[in-house]
Structure formats: structure tokens, C-alpha cells
Image (tube, grey):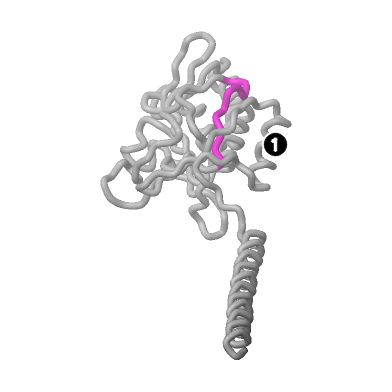
Amino acid sequence: MWSFFGCTFCAMLYVTVMGLKAIKRCILLGSILLLSSCGGREKPDVPRSGQAASSETVRQCMAALKTKSVRFSGLPNKSFDNGCRTIDTIKLMDFGTPATNLGAMTCPLANNFTDWARYAVGPAAKMYLKGEVVRIETMGTFNCRNVNGGRSGKLSEHAFANAIDISAFILRDGRRVSILDGWRGSAEEQAFLRRLHQSACKRFGTVLGPDYNSAHANHFHFDMAQSMTNGTSFCR
């Protein structure tokens, strides 16, 4: 008799203990899942390589470009081991004046560049050169390198697709006005290029030209970095 009841009691105890363990495991698993779901809602979205641009600022910038009838295409996000990256960038397709060597650009850079081309380059060409600019020659936008191309130092804004270098302007009559030759060229060329330089200082965070140093003798450098603490541009 004792053997029977003893075995029965042991079996019931085993089932109870195992049941409690199972319940504890379920409670623990449920807690983990609950915390995970809560954390997922609170964690902000982080752009990853290949992810489309999604920030409100970028959406507003793209909407502004569309309003101005600028054609462009969005580009995938990319990050590189050395810190260079192209995040929320676009490629300009058509904004009225053809431009060479345009690659990935941040939307604010593209927006200010197209405005500069439309509202500064065109009118200045008519005023000083009595002609029409039909092409803007650039030295590119994205370039994974340090400032001034050095082996050490901080990354250039080109490393983030946040800068563009302008080298020359082609007029409808065939004339080519380059930064290298025109900066100290004829009176008309000098006036034209200096007007464009001054206008750029109102649109970009950093503007560098031939008077800054010899490295910029052949181009204007524009980028969107705010170099001054009060938000004004660094214009040289």
C-alpha cells in the first residue's frame, strides 16, 4: 500500500515541479519578448547602407526641388570603413543648365547649387559677358579623401558628398571662362567670376576660391558645412 501511494505522490510531485519550471520559463520568455517589443518602438530609425532617405528634412528638401521642376534621382546610402559616406544623397538629372561630373550630392547642397546656377550664373553671364551659359564644368562632388587631399587630417566635405568644385563655364558662342584663367583675365571675366563668388557666399557654408590658396587656383569650392559659430559662411 505504501509503495503504491508513495509512487503516486512522487509522480504528482514531479509533475508539479516540472509544471512550475515550465511556467517560469514561459513567464521569462514572455518578459523578454515584451521588453524587446517595447525597445523596438522606442529605438529611433538608423539609416543603413542601401536604405532610402527618410528624414523629414530630406523629404522637405526633395519636395522643394520638385516644386522648382528639378529632376533628380535618389541614391542608396553607402558607408565606407574610413568614415566616408553618402547618406540621403541624390543625383541631379536636369535643372536647366547641364553640368559635368555631377555625382552623389546631399539634398541641401543640390538645392543651393541649382539655385546658384539659375539665379546667379545666368544673370551674371548676361550682365558681364553678354552671353548665355550653356554648360557648367565641375570637378565632381563625392570624393573619399581628406582636406586638401592630404594623407592625414580631417575628412573633406567631399567625403560626405556635401561639396562641389566648379572649374569653368561654357557660353553659347563657344567661349570658355575658367576659374584658372578668368580670375585674373579680362575685366569682364573678372567681374563675372567675382560676382558668382560673392553670390555663392550667400548660399553655401564654405566658399573657397583662387584668393584663398594655390590649391584653389583653378576652381571654386562650395560646401554646406557651417564654419562659423554664428551660422554665417566662411567665404575666401
Q: Which residues are magenta?
A: 88-97
Residue 157 colored magenta? no
Quarter of the figure with the N terminus: bottom right
The answer to whether residue 48 is visible is yes
Residue 97 picture quarter = top right
The answer to whether residue 198 is visible is no
Q: Residue furthest right?
A: 67
Observer-nearest residue: 96 or 181?
Answer: 96
Residue 88 spot, x, y in % from top left: 56, 41
Look at the picture and state if 17 lies above or below 121.
below
Residue at 51% x, 15% y: name it: 171
| Label 1, residues with CA under 10 Å away: few <14, some 14-19, many ≥20 | some
Residue named by callout 1: 64
Residue at 57% x, 16% y: name it: 132
Residue 58 spot, x, y in % from top left: 63, 43
Q: How many marks?
A: 1
Observer-nearest residue: 164 or 73?
Answer: 73
Q: Is residue 165 left or right of residue 124?
A: left
Look at the picture and state if 141 lies above or below 37.
above
Look at the picture and state if 167 lies above or below 77.
above
Q: Is residue 234 left or right of residue 4?
A: left
Residue at 48% x, 27% y: name it: 102
As helix, strand or loop, the secondary structure at mark 1 comes to helix
**Main SS of residues in magenta:** strand
